[in-house]
Image (cartoon, rainbow, N blue to C red):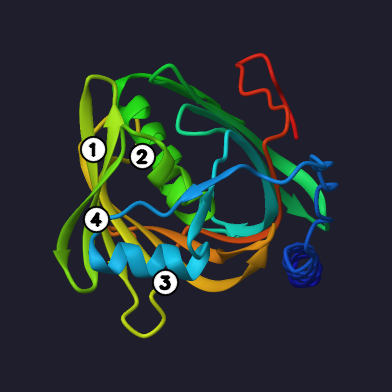
Amino acid sequence: MIKLLTIAGGVVAAMAGLGWAGLQIRPASFPAVPRQSAPLETMPLPAGLPAPVERFYRMVYGERVPVIHTAVISGRAKMRPVGGITFPARFRFIHEAGRSYRHYIEATVFGLPVLRANEYYGDGRGRLELPWGAEEGPQIDQAANLSLWAETADMLPAILLTDPRVRWEPVDDATALLVVPFGTTEERFVARFDPATGGLWLLESMRYKSATGGKTLWLNESRGWSTLGGYTLATSSAVTWADDGRPWFVLTLEDIAYNVAVDTSLSARGP
């Protein structure tokens, strides 16, 4: 019996070690999306922006802001979907500017997908298609809308100036309010800017965490900046629920294509 228990313990330890090894291997990146050949249309940086907002946009774009209609954003990540286990992952986010998105995410082991998620937002409605089931409803709609605008602020900030439904309100030299549409109402983010660099450092909002229950403080933190797609963007970021206390999704942007054909419909699947 002792020998059998020793063997069983060794097998469990070996399996645990094998699983740990599989979680250290990053998946391959999704293939790059073909670019358009024509340069992006631009517009002058608007006057009258709150001071930290103007400083941020001058850092990212200079005097002229690109007009972005669609974008395909790809990269890799670390995520904790369930059970506290952190998986390597890869993602592709497909945006129709300020209107809709489709997220495709793969969590992987040994670089191979073990969990796939398709998330959608359009016409004010959200839908999550997860391995353990689908989620819809008013709370999901509100959460998805905030996700749309948080990603826009981090990855496609020009849209926050070119969309007439969006406005910035002043708070102080390092803080502003970002007001975005949600159906017939509005939602607000507290936007905090780094006084040293001028970069958008943190977005705070109250978001539903699931289809049931109340709102939770939701934090989107920019952790690193580099040039991608011709502009200085937050290419490293982390998403945290305040009641959790640590990020559940840490993203690294690797590829972005502007004004390309996209499909954000519920019938679309995969990257």
**Disc assigned to residue 187:** 1
Gap in Å between the C-alphas at discs 3 and 2?
20 Å
Residue at 35 percent across and 19 percent down: it is: 137
Residue 232 position, x and y percent, is: 58, 67
Contact (Cβ within 8 Å) of mark 1 with mark 2 = yes
Amino acid at dot 1: Glu
Identify whether 199 is placed above or below 128: below
Residue 43 as seen in the image, left or right of residue 55: right
Please name the residue that numbered disc 3 is placed on: 199
Residue 76 as seen in the image, left or right of residue 98: right
Mark 2 or mark 4, whichever is nearer to me:
4
User: Can residue 151 be seen in this snapshot?
Assistant: no
Mark 4 or mark 3, whichever is nearer to me:
4
Please name the residue that numbered disc 4 is placed on: 48
Mark 4 or mark 1, whichever is nearer to me:
4
Query: Of 141 and 231, which appears nearest the observer?
Result: 231
Identify whether 27 is placed above or below 224: above
Q: Quadrant of residue 149?
A: top left
Residue at 35 percent across and 51 percent down: it is: 46
Amino acid at dot 3: Gly
Q: Point out the image quarter for the N terminus.
A: bottom right
Amino acid at dot 2: Leu
Gap in Å between the C-alphas at discs 4 and 1?
21 Å
